[in-house]
Image (cartoon, rainbow, N blue to C red):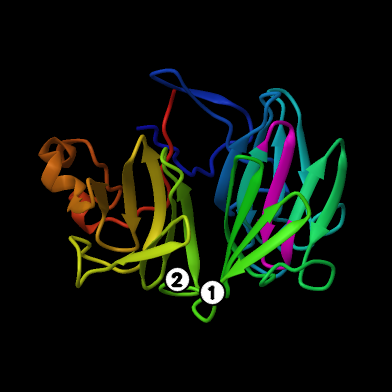
Amino acid sequence: LFFFFYLSINCQPTSSGFGVTNWGYQTGFFSLLFKSSIAIDASGNKWIGSIPQTVNSKAGVQKFNGSNWIVYNDTNGLPSKHVTSIATNGNTVYVGTKKGVAKYENGIWSVYNTINSQIISDTINTLFFNNNTLWIGTNKGVSKLTGNTWINYNTINSQLCNNNVQAIEQVSNGDMWFGTSQGLSKLSGTNWVTYDSINSGLLSNNITALCSSSNRLFIGSNSKGAFLLENNIIKPLFQLYPELQNIIYNPEGADNNIMKTKIFDFTKDA
């Protein structure tokens, strides 16, 4: 597992040891902002999204090529400076905001919203790209974009358990998983199955993060830590790997039990 820590420190890069470099924030842009998302395109550019803490905060997304930073916000390409998620396809970058999805391709920004497309909502929670398809999780369901074709899923036209979709993942057999604020739904072909705290080992229905390894699914919750789904059985990650208790760090020092931790995101290495 790879852990990404959100930091606001000095403006100049400093070494923290153990191979870690702290880049901090760029003065006037990312100072004291919550970093919401990070992605890397095919050229190795890092894209870092942020959420404004005040009305006048200069949030948005920063592109970092290893030496230089470029800031994009609602003045030069994005529909909103409130960035919730980022996904990449080669050197094409998709940025989810509170006013639609921005697409960066060949140096040009374009926007998908409810006025110019069939996207189900402009309030974007999460993005997932795979197999030439962009999946968009919103507060009103899921939008699927393949080429120029849109398909929308919500609690009215499907068995999605809740419209507030906060995480999306695809496992190796092609099944799609959707983490919502009221449970976890799986789309297998045209069939839907939902897991929640009543019919499974989930201790929380508020699903905030998903990450797959083969057909194993790591599940992050809003307040009850992480879980693993394998062979259709969900178990707390801490129960499966007790040694995690020794390496999970809580800066407040009150409780380092992963069972009581809010999981913001997962990712995996090669």
116 vs 206, nearest the viewer? 116
Q: For this view, does 169 lie left or right of residue 49? A: left
Amino acid at pointer 2: Leu
Q: Is residue 48 visible?
A: no
Quadrant for residue 100, please give it: bottom right
201 vs 58, nearest the viewer? 201
* Pointer 1 or 2: first along the chain: 1
Determine whether 132 is above or below 254 in the image: above
Q: Position of residue 125 (x, y in %)?
A: 56, 62
Q: Is residue 222 visible?
A: yes
The span picked out in magenta is 89-101
- Dot 1 alpha-carbon crowd within 10 angstroms: few under 14, some 14 to 19, many 20 or more: many
Quadrant of the drawing holding the N terminus? top left
Specify whether residue 91 is painted magenta: yes
Q: For this view, does 89 lie left or right of residue 186? A: right
Question: Residue 160 has which mark?
Answer: 2
- Dot 2 alpha-carbon crowd within 10 angstroms: few under 14, some 14 to 19, many 20 or more: many
Q: Name the residue at 86% across, 57% down.
A: 75
Quadrant of the drawing holding the C terminus? top left
Q: Position of residue 76 (x, y in %)?
A: 87, 52
Q: Name the residue at 11% across, 47% down.
A: 239
User: What kind of element bears circle 1?
Assistant: loop
Q: For this view, does 52 lie left or right of residue 112? A: left
Amino acid at pointer 1: Asn
CA gap, disc 1 and disc 2:
6 Å
Q: Position of residue 139 (x, y in %)?
A: 56, 73
Residue at label 1? 154
59 vs 124, nearest the viewer? 124
The dominant secondary structure in magenta is strand
Q: Position of residue 94 (x, y in %)?
A: 70, 47
Question: Residue 33 has which mark?
Answer: none
Specify whether residue 98 is painted magenta: yes
